[in-house]
Image (cartoon, rainbow, N blue to C red):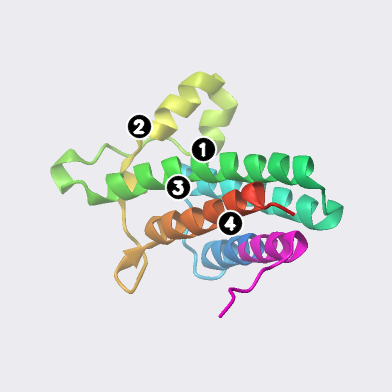
Amino acid sequence: MATPSFSTRTLACIGFIACASLIAIALYFQHIESLDPCPLCIFQRVAFIGMGVVFLATFLHNPASAGRRLYGLLAAVFGVLGLGIAARHVWLQSLPAHQVPECGPGLDYMLEVFPLRKMLETVFKGSGECAEVSWTWFGISMPGWSLIWLAILTALALMLMSRKS
């Protein structure tokens, strides 16, 4: 039995729809369920948005082999960055209470006051709000689900990158 072969446009469309759906879900939790995102959550959203934009561009452009590799590489870069952020977030959530960093300033404040490097250092150090688990589904926190989806979407990007034609 042969495995189904999806076109580049179909794979890119699936990637875009997944990213758009995940951002819609995040916005639902933020605006309807009142779960404000921590700085690491916001950075994970940026990774999903970056991947979504690349998947949409791939769908619209339907590039030949060199373009497909470039789009796949761009989406994979966003995915790997997002994976690193989500993995850090999951790690922070797994720390014992006495090892959790104290809460820090909000991302808006840091963007206004801190230089870029200091802001990034502060965000990736993590804070108490990033270590808080406020929602789970099947025992997996929101950053855990982000990690899973970023892995799936990064694999999809690598599939686009390695397609023959």
Q: Position of residue 120 (x, y in %)?
A: 48, 28
Instruction: State yes or no: residue 7 in magenta.
Output: yes
Which of the two residues, 15 or 19, is positioned nearer the viewer here?
15
Farthest right residue in view: 61
Identity of the residue furthest to the front in this view: 1
Residue receiving disc 3: 38
Which amino acid type is shown beneath numbered disc 4? Leu
Spatial CA distance of label 1 from label 2 is 13 Å
Q: Amino acid at mark 3?
A: Cys
Asked which quadrant contains residue 75, the reply is top right
Q: CA distance from mark 4 to mark 1?
A: 30 Å
Which quadrant of the figure contains the C terminus?
bottom right
Answer left or right for 42 relative to 163.
Answer: left
Helix, strand or loop at mark 2: helix
Q: Find residue 142 and report its horizontal and vertical position in percent.
A: 41, 61
- Which of the two labelled residues, at mark 2 and mark 3, occupies the earlier sequence position? 3
Residue 100 sits inside the magenta stretch: no
Q: Nearer the viewer, residue 101 or 160?
A: 160
Could you tell me how far apart the alpha carbons at marks 4 and 3 are, in whole angstroms?
27 Å
Looking at marks 1 and 2 on the same chain, the residue that comes earlier in the sequence is marked by: 1
Question: In the rendered structure, which segment of residues is drawn in magenta?
Answer: 1-18
Tell me residue 69's x, y (percent).
Answer: 69, 42
